[in-house]
Amino acid sequence: MRPAHVAGVGVSEFGKFPDVSLPTLVADSVQAAMADADMSNVDAIYLGNVYGSSGIGPRALSSLHAAGVPIVTIEAACASSTLAFIEASWAVSTGRYETVLVVGCEQLSSRFSGGIRPNSADPEGHAGLVLPALYAMAANRYIEYYGLTHEQLAMVSVKNHENGAKNPRAQYRRAVTLDEVMNSPMIADPLTLLQCCPISDGSASAVITARDHPKGILIAGYKLGSGGLWDYASPHVWGYDLVSRVALDVYRDLGITPLEIDLFEVHDAFTIGEIVTTEALGLAEIGCGGMFVESGASGLDGKSPVNPSGGLLSKGHPLGATGLSQVTEVVLQLRDEAGDCQVDGARRGMVETMGGGVSMVDGNACGVIVLENNRAQ
Amino acid sequence: MDERDDSKPDEIVDHGQFQITKRGGQFVIDGKSCSKCGHHFAMAPRECRKCGASLVDATFGPRGEVWSYTIVYMKAARRTTPYTLAYIDLLEGPRIIAHVRGESVRPNVGQMAELVGLTDSGDPLVVCV
């Protein structure tokens, strides 16, 4: 296995652009990533997308030079481009390709107003368990079982919006107060509007190469997993077991602990998601994720900054583009180019993306990636 | 004493995924249990999703415990809001998603609930007791 590096990253604007085509959003991020890497050719393209039509790969890339290289399309719900990145990294490390472009993209606002409709083939979807409601189930379980407070939930939103206000790539660049979060309209009790990520359109891209590259950020480790059975037999809320298992595999592979990671970009589609994920990643004991955010440990200046970019809550969540948007944020951090969101001295960062949810399955997919700046200071 | 043959259902209401049957005056779910590990399923998978072994018929409900709940205000799928949903862990049985009867009713985690039929849209309906 040879090392693979991220040579360049790029994102389109994230937001609600019902009149902007997917190929336009993709062209924005791909041209930015190729320019960032100072490259013009790749050997293959891996593309993550959720709600596209058949032929989404060539279709999404239809505004760009049709180089005729293989296009591999991956769908894994919210983790689609995280898995595309992992598969592309593997393909480069094993020698299948020298340089690969990874693209994530989604056009949601022209498809959904309000929220994403759940799949009625599942009993949950049929009963109207929209995604915020699935997470709200976890939140109420945590409130009553572990003593999580409504304020602690809201603090995740306050922290991430404060970070997002400093991020030029964020869909929402406005800090919010605890009162604003708690008094925003109720979506699925106990989750209020400002505790839920927005519907977003956007694209993000990265160039992965085996070549030495002046900007190269080492892809130090990664794992992916799909959920096993999640039902009455699990002592945990939905998603915990999967994220925990995948993260543990990564820590074991690298021989590191969570305390040896300088920043985390994690799946905070809903505030409770970040709380449960910080526990599953080993940053907090189970049931203590609320105290963890309240302590300030996950703040920009904390011992383990979580979502210094503003997370999905601020940055937006164009499903297929989300993973590579997280990768972009970590790469910029490790290149010391994250501007006002910069975590001082960041040398190693983690991306975690969780895709759900099929009935009785603990998440469609989870991808965890560790990136490192291993160049001499 | 009123003798009735409880093996014969009064009424079968096919939800599509759950088969809810009114038997002996009570609503129950006809599901499956694993012949090897004993895991319970409200739906009827082809094999045990826990260990892969074959399944046998099993009946669950009507009583269970609220694992968690939420009151949904978000508009989606043309439903009248708000509505309360709960995951119910049926006693000695599987977890099911259910609507909770009553407007903006707020159950507690661990509260007992009883399956009382189906909603107009065909989803399991419980009352908290």
Image (spheres, coloured by chain):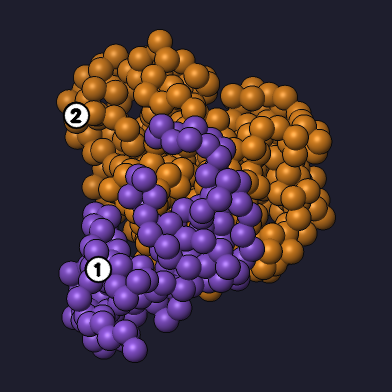
User: Which residue is at 25% across, 17% downward?
Assistant: A62
Q: Chain of mark 1?
A: B
User: Which residue is at 71% across, 49% downward?
Assistant: A153
* Horizontal side of residue A105 vs A97, given as left or right: right
The residue beneath circle 1 is: B10
Label 2 to label 1, Cα distance in Å? 50 Å
In what element is the residue under mark 1? loop
Give the residue type at disc 2: Gly
In what element is the residue under mark 2? loop
Instruction: Answer above or below: position of A46 versus A204.
Output: below
Foreground of the two, B79 or B25? B25
- Residue A326 appears in the rendering: yes
Give the residue type at disc 1: Asp
Residue A197 image offset from top left, x and y in percent = 57, 35
For chain B, what colour was chosen? Answer: purple
Residue B86 image offset from top left, x and y in percent = 51, 58
Foreground of the two, B110 or B27? B27
* Horizontal side of residue A52 vs A159, given as left or right: left
Chain displayed in orange: A
Q: Chain of mark 2?
A: A
Residue B110 image offset from top left, x and y in percent = 60, 71
Whether tag 2 and tag 1 are in contact, CB under 8 A, the answer is no
Q: Nearer the viewer, mark 2 or mark 1?
A: 1
Instruction: Answer above or below: position of A275 versus B2.
Output: above
Res. B70 mark: none
The residue beneath circle 2 is: A55
